[in-house]
Amino acid sequence: MAARRRKRGAYGTGLTGVRRRAEGPAGLRKLPPELEELAAGRRDTLRPRRRPRGRIHDSRVAGLIAGVANHEARRVYDARLERLRRAAADADDATLERELCIVLLLGLWRARSITGFDAFAQDVVGVPHERAATLARAGADQRGVALERLPDVAVALWLRSEAALLERCPEAAVDVRVEREQLRLSLSLPLAPPERAAEAVAAVGRAAAALARVLASEPPRGH
């Protein structure tokens, strides 16, 4: 009799506990980390969400530039380095101003693990670092942009797009700017033959789609 009473439960209902409905989720739902800390008493208030700053938290350890495959970044680096060395040999200040400005905007020296802009300009390109900085500032003034590295998303979009164009349609060019928190992408396309322009646009579209997949795979901010 005692065993039968234990089986039927303390209230004679035949239930030994609360059963979860079959269609309900298995196990306990996990709270976001900030709510778990609040519930456990390790935090008194919730921190306000940080304003996004255009940074990419790339999960690939080997990536030298966030959001960009190394082979893509190096393809752009090598093409622009060749352009810079040619301009330095020809004393073409207009090209040097433009290219050195872009190197700073992209932080392009990272693609070949150079320590910084000064080392890149003086030891790799062959332009004294003080003169290189002056040329880069002149290039930034002409473009109407601040001479500082672009947000990670803009850098990744630029490098991926330019790498795709160098492979598929090298006569096309891409430019990316940030103006009043707006990302502006522009393309310079060949007029003839027309299929080359279409191929260039398609190449940039594929590069942007690949970047979107990288961004979609990242954990939410604050986790």
Image (tube, rainbow, N blue to C red):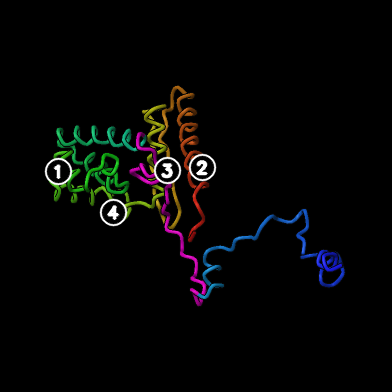
- Which residues make up the magenta segment? 42-71
Q: For the view shown, which residue lies furthest in the left direction?
A: 128
Vertical comparison of 140 with 78: above or below: below
The front one of 94 and 150 is 150
Alpha carbon of mark 3 to alpha carbon of mark 2: how far? 12 Å
For numbered disc 4, what is the local secondary structure?
Answer: loop
| Quadrant of res 17 | bottom right
Q: Badge 1 is on which residue?
A: 122
Of tags 4 and 1, which is closer to the observer? 1
Of tags 4 and 3, which is closer to the observer? 3
Q: Main secondary structure of the magenta part?
A: loop
Q: Badge 4 is on which residue?
A: 147
Check disc 2 and give the amino acid type: Arg
Residue 23 image offset from top left, x and y in percent: 77, 53
**Residue 23 left/right relative to 149:** right
**Residue 121 left/right relative to 207:** left
Q: Badge 3 is on which residue?
A: 157
| Quadrant of res 185 | top left
Q: Badge 2 is on which residue?
A: 213
Q: Residues within 10 Å of mark 2 (few under 14, many from 20)?
A: few
**Residue 20 left/right relative to 208:** right
Check disc 1 and give the amino acid type: Gln
**Residue 67 left/right relative to 83:** right
Residue 200 image offset from top left, x and y in percent: 45, 30
Can residue 55 be found in the magenta stretch?
Answer: yes
Alpha carbon of mark 2 to alpha carbon of mark 1: how far? 37 Å
For numbered disc 2, what is the local secondary structure?
Answer: helix
Q: Residue at x 24, y 44 (%)?
A: 100
